[in-house]
Image (spheres, rainbow, N blue to C red):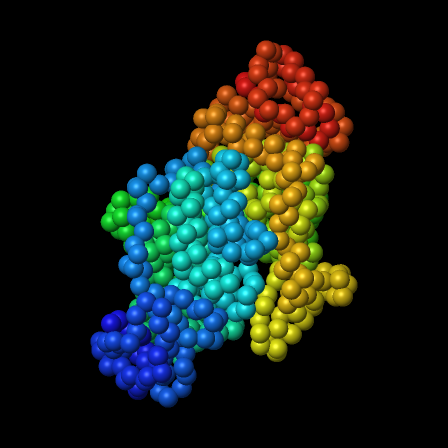
C-alpha cells in the first residue's frame, strides 16, 4: 500500500486513477490531497483527475515510461536500497576537473548504461567530476533536456530511474563524482501539466523560454518546496554529489530569502545528515559575486559559478569572432583582467548590452569559478554546432586548452573536446505535437537567417539526422590527429594535478603580462610560467631568470629558454618553472 499525495489547492475534487480504478482523494492542510492506495506498489501505473479532467501525470512522478503524456509509475526508492557513498566522496573544487556530457549523444546507444562503458576513458583522462546535462523527462526521445516537464523522473529513453542509479554507482566505483544539471527557471512547452494542479507559474515575469515560475507570489511556498525537494531528491535518492543550476539569472525571486540561498542552506543541512560533501554550481551571466558569497556577506552561498567572461574572452582571442556578446572581448587585456580579477565586465560598459555590467569579484577564490574553452551552449547555440576545433587550428586549440588547465579557475571540458571531436553538437528536439515541431523548426531557421545564414542550410532540430550527427565517434581517439590532442589534454590534466601552484585558487597571486600588437601573453602561477605565442611567427618573449629552468610541457618543439627571454615558435605554448 502506498500513501499518494498531490498538491492541488484550488481543486474541488481530485481522484487517483490507477490499475483500472478511480479513488477519491481527501483534501488536507495547505491544499494537499492524499489517499491510501492498496493497489499502488512499486511498478504500478497511476495518474490524477482534477475536477473531472485528466488523467494527468503526477507532478512529482518518479518515472514516466510512456513519456510526458503517459501515466506515472510508482517508484519505491527504498526497495533494493543501494549502499550509500562512503563519505570520502568527491575531491575539493580546487583539484576538480569537470567533464560535461549529454547522455543521448555521448555514446551511439545514448543511454545511462552505455555511459558506464566509457567511464574508464574519463578516469584515465584525469576527470574528477562527471556533469550530466539535464535528464528529467522531456518531450520525445531526444533533446538537450532543458525543456523538461516531469522534473522528478529520469528520462525514459535514457534508462529511467534504475539506469541512472546504475550510472551514478558506476561513477563512484571509478572514483568519479557526479553532478546533475537542473532547471529551476522554466518548464518545457509540451507535457507541462503543472498549471492544472496549482499556481506554479506567474504572468508577472517572463523568461526567454515562456512562463516564469511563481517563486514569490500567492501560493509560492509550495512551489518553492517543489523545486527545493526536487534538488534534494537527486542528492539523496540518486546519490548525486552536486547540482549545476541552469541560468540563475532567469530565476526571478523578490523574496527576502532568495530561492538559491534557501536551496544552499537546505543542501548544507542534507550534507551534514548524509555525512558527505555536496556542491552547487550556478550558471550565471550576471557577473555578480553575490551568487557565490556566503549569506553572512549578503550572498546566496552557492559553491561556484560558470565564468562566462573567461570563455568569451578566450574564444574571441582564438577565433577572432566579435559578433553578439563577443563584441565586449577580443583583446588580450580582457583575458588578463579575467585571469587576475575573476571578471572582465566588473562594472564597466558593455557594448553588447549598451550599459554597465557586473561588479568586482575582488576577494573571491578562483575555485568559485568554473572556466572552459567550450560547453554545450557555446557549441550548440551556433547554427552548425561547430566546436572550437572546427574554428581554429590544432595549434591554437592547444594554447586554449593550456590556458584553461593552468588558470586559477576550476577547469571543465565538454564531451569530445579532449580529442578535438569532428562531430558537431547541434540543437535537436523531438516534439510530437506537429504545430510545436513546426514552430521550433521555423524559429531556428528564422533566428539564423537574421545572421545571414541561408535558412535551407540551418539543420532542422526536429530531424533525427540532426541528433545522430551530434553523437560522438569513439573511433576518433584511436586515430590521428585526434590521438595527439588527447595526449595533450592528458598531459595538461596530469600537470595540473602534479603542480600545486596550478591548483592555487588565490587569484591575486596570478600575474599576467601581454603585448596586444605582438599577440603574446605570459601568466605566472607561483613557480610556474605559462608562455603563449598567439602570433603565427616565432618570437622572443621577455621573461626574467629562465636560465636552466625546466620546461614541463610544450605544444611544439623548438622552445629555447635563455636568461631573460624565451623563444617560442608560432602558435605555441610552453609551461615551465621559474
Q: How many marks?
A: 0
Percent of width and height locating residue 301: 35, 49
Does residue 35 appear in this view? yes
Does residue 248 appear in this view? no
Horizontal side of 501 relative to 51 (left or right) equals: right
Percent of width and height locating residue 246: 47, 56
Find residue 165 and report its image quarter.
Answer: bottom left
Horizontal side of 343 relative to 321 (left or right) equals: left
Above or below, 275 against 139 in this view is: above
Q: Please report the residue visible at 39 percent of the width from the left and 37 percent of the height from the top.
A: 91
Above or below, 17 against 464 in this view is: below
Find residue 86 and report its image quarter.
Answer: top left
Q: Who is closer to the viewer here, 74 or 466?
A: 74
Q: Please report the residue visible at 32 percent of the width from the left and 80 percent of the height from the top.
A: 16
Percent of width and height locating residue 22: 32, 85
Q: Who is closer to the viewer here, 143 or 96?
A: 143
Q: Please report the residue visible at 54 percent of the width from the left and 18 percent of the height from the top.
A: 578
Amino acid at each position: 500500500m502506498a500513501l499518494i499525495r498531490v498538491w492541488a489547492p484550488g481543486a474541488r475534487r481530485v481522484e487517483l486513477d490507477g490499475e483500472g480504478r478511480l479513488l477519491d482523494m481527501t483534501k488536507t492542510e495547505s491544499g494537499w490531497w492524499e489517499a491510501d492506495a492498496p493497489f499502488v506498489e512499486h511498478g504500478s501505473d497511476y495518474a490524477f483527475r482534477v475536477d473531472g479532467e485528466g488523467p494527468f501525470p503526477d507532478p512529482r512522478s518518479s518515472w514516466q515510461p510512456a513519456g510526458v503524456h503517459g501515466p506515472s509509475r510508482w517508484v519505491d526508492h527504498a526497495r533494493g536500497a543501494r549502499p550509500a557513498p562512503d563519505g570520502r566522496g568527491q575531491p575539493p573544487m580546487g583539484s576538480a576537473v569537470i567533464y560535461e556530457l549529454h547522455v543521448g549523444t555521448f555514446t551511439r546507444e545514448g543511454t545511462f548504461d552505455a555511459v558506464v562503458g566509457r567511464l574508464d576513458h574519463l578516469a584515465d583522462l584525469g576527470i574528477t567530476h562527471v556533469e550530466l546535462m539535464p535528464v528529467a523527462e522531456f518531450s520525445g526521445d531526444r533533446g538537450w533536456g532543458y525543456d523538461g516537464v516531469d522534473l522528478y523522473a529520469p528520462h525514459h529513453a535514457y534508462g529511467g530511474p534504475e539506469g541512472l542509479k546504475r550510472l551514478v554507482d558506476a561513477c563512484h566505483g571509478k572514483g568519479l563524482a557526479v553532478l546533475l544539471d537542473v532547471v529551476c527557471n522554466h518548464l518545457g512547452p509540451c507535457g507541462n501539466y503543472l498549471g492544472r494542479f496549482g499556481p506554479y507559474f506567474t504572468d508577472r515575469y517572463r523568461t526567454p523560454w515562456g512562463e516564469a515560475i511563481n517563486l514569490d507570489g500567492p501560493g509560492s511556498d509550495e512551489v518553492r518546496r517543489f523545486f527545493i525537494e526536487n534538488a534534494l531528491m537527486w542528492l539523496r535518492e540518486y546519490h548525486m554529489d552536486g547540482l549545476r543550476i541552469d541560468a540563475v539569472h532567469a530565476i526571478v525571486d523578490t523574496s527576502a530569502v532568495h530561492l538559491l540561498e534557501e536551496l544552499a542552506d537546505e543542501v548544507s543541512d542534507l550534507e551534514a545528515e548524509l555525512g558527505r560533501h555536496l556542491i552547487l554550481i550556478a550558471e550565471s551571466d550576471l557577473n555578480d559575486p553575490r551568487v557565490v558569497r556566503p549569506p553572512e556577506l549578503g550572498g546566496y552561498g552557492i559553491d561556484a559559478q560558470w565564468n562566462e567572461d573567461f570563455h568569451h574572452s578566450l574564444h574571441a582571442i582564438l577565433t577572432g569572432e566579435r559578433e553578439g556578446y563577443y563584441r565586449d572581448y577580443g583583446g588580450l587585456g580582457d583575458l588578463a583582467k579575467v585571469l587576475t580579477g575573476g571578471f572582465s565586465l566588473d562594472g564597466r560598459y558593455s557594448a553588447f548590452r549598451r550599459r554597465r555590467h557586473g561588479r568586482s569579484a575582488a576577494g573571491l577564490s578562483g575555485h568559485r569559478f568554473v572556466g572552459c574553452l567550450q560547453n554545450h551552449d557555446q557549441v550548440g547555440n551556433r547554427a552548425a554546432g561547430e566546436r572550437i576545433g572546427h574554428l581554429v587550428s590544432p595549434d591554437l586549440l592547444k594554447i586554449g586548452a593550456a590556458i584553461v588547465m593552468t588558470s586559477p579557475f576550476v577547469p571543465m571540458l565538454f564531451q569530445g573536446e579532449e580529442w578535438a571531436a569532428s562531430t558537431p553538437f547541434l540543437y535537436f528536439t523531438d516534439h510530437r505535437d506537429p504545430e510545436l515541431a513546426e514552430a521550433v523548426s521555423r524559429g531556428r531557421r528564422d533566428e539564423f537567417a537574421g545572421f545571414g545564414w541561408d535558412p535551407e542550410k540551418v539543420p532542422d532540430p526536429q530531424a533525427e539526422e540532426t541528433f545522430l550527427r551530434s553523437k560522438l565517434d569513439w573511433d576518433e581517439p584511436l586515430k590521428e590527429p585526434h590521438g595527439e590532442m588527447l595526449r595533450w589534454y592528458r598531459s595538461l590534466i596530469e600537470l595540473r594535478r602534479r603542480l600545486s601552484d596550478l591548483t592555487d585558487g588565490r587569484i591575486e597571486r596570478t600575474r599576467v603580462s601581454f603585448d596586444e600588437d605582438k599577440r603574446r601573453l605570459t601568466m605566472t602561477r607561483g613557480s610556474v610560467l605559462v608562455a603563449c605565442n598567439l602570433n603565427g611567427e616565432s618570437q622572443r618573449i621577455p621573461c626574467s631568470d629562465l636560465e636552466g629552468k625546466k620546461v614541463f610541457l610544450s605544444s611544439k618543439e623548438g622552445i629555447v629558454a635563455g636568461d631573460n627571454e624565451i623563444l617560442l615558435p608560432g602558435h605555441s605554448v610552453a609551461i615551465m618553472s621559474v
